Image (cartoon, rainbow, N blue to C red):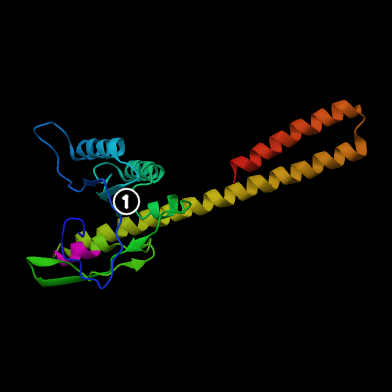
């Protein structure tokens, strides 16, 4: 805004100088080019990634929403990582809360949320009232604000109840699968370590192999155990 000559309501400000403003903001398809919403998103993102520099200002809003959630998270993460490598200055707005986890190892990534209040003045006027504040942190993983917004639209109660039931069931299923996966990995590691102890004890007490063959056998076994541990970390 400062570079455009717009008024900035602040007593003091320090601004970067940018060589370009690149945006991916709309969610519309392109009938003239025969592009779906997702195809249009990808074309815009390809253009941004292709010409962005470390001095570019990039605004990206809700990329990946035109495809399945898993694919959307994956492509959003990949695009974000590429922009991080380019060292561009990026505002990346998304409802994919998983990105706060997948990108957390990047030291240049900072998570912010914009507080809002759900409201409804009438049956035709409902939505979210933004508080125009930026707060550190990530959104709650269990928040189903979309269902709350649907309630403000006066959808039938049985539709809302079914929608919430399915959303919560899927969340619980995903959590159980994650817990089962962690438990299974721990079990595999324990079995591998027990097998390691047994093999080492047998080699120490009962092995009659020459030293070179014993060393080769232990090296192969060490390699197998290390592979198991790596696969289950």
- Evaluate whether residue 5 shows in this view: yes
From the viewer's perspective, is residue 11 above or below residue 71? below
* Front-most of residues 66 and 122: 66
Q: Is residue 123 magenta?
A: no
**Callout 1: few (<14), some (14-19), or many (20+) C-alpha neighbours within 10 Å?**
some
Q: Is residue 152 above or below residue 28?
A: below
Evaluate whether residue 93 shows in this view. Answer: no
Q: Quadrant of the N terminus?
A: bottom left
Residue 158 placement (x, y as % from top left): 20, 62
Q: Main secondary structure of the magenta part?
A: helix
Numbered disc 1: secondary structure: strand
Q: Position of residue 66 (x, y in %)?
A: 23, 43
Query: Of 104 and 228, which appears nearest the observer?
Result: 104
Residue 47 x/y as whole percent: 25, 36
Nearest to the observer: residue 132 or residue 34: 132
Query: In which quadrant of the rendered view does residue 149 lie?
Result: bottom left
**Seen in the image, is 33 located left or right of residue 48?**
left
Q: Residue drawn at (70%, 34%), measured in percent from left and top?
A: 224
Q: How many marks?
A: 1
Residue that badge 1 annotates: 90
**Residue placed at 28% from the left, 52% from the top?**
17
- Measured along the vertical axis of the image, is residue 53 above or below residue 105? above
Percent from the top left, x then y, of residue 134? 30, 67
Q: Residue at x 27, y 41 (%)?
A: 67
Identify which residue, 127 or 163, lies in the foreground.
127
Residue at point 75%, 42% (across, down) = 195
Left or right for 207, reference 124: right
Q: Which residues are magenta?
A: 148-153
């Amino acid at each position: 805004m400062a570079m455009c000559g717009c008024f900035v309501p602040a007593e003091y400000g320090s601004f970067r100088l940018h060589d370009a403003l690149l945006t991916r903001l709309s969610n519309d398809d392109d009938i003239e080019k025969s592009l779906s919403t997702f195809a249009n998103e990808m074309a815009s993102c390809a253009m941004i990634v292709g010409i962005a520099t470390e001095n570019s200002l990039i605004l990206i809003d809700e990329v990946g929403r035109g495809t399945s959630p898993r694919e959307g998270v994956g492509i959003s993460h990949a695009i974000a990582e590429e922009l991080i490598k380019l060292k561009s200055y990026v505002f990346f707005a998304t409802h994919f809360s998983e990105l706060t986890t997948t990108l957390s190892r990047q030291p240049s990534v900072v998570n912010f949320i914009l507080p809002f209040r759900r409201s409804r003045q009438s049956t035709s006027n409902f939505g979210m009232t933004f508080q125009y504040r930026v707060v550190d942190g990530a959104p709650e993983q269990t928040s189903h604000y979309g269902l709350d917004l649907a309630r403000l639209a006066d959808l039938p109660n049985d539709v809302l109840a079914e929608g919430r039931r399915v959303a919560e069931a899927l969340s619980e299923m995903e959590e159980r699968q994650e817990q089962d996966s962690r438990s299974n990995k721990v079990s595999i590691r324990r079995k591998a370590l027990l097998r390691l102890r047994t093999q080492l004890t047998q080699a120490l007490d009962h092995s009659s192999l020459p030293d070179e063959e014993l060393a080769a056998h232990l090296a192969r076994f060490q390699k197998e155990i290390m592979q198991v541990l790596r696969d289950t970390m």
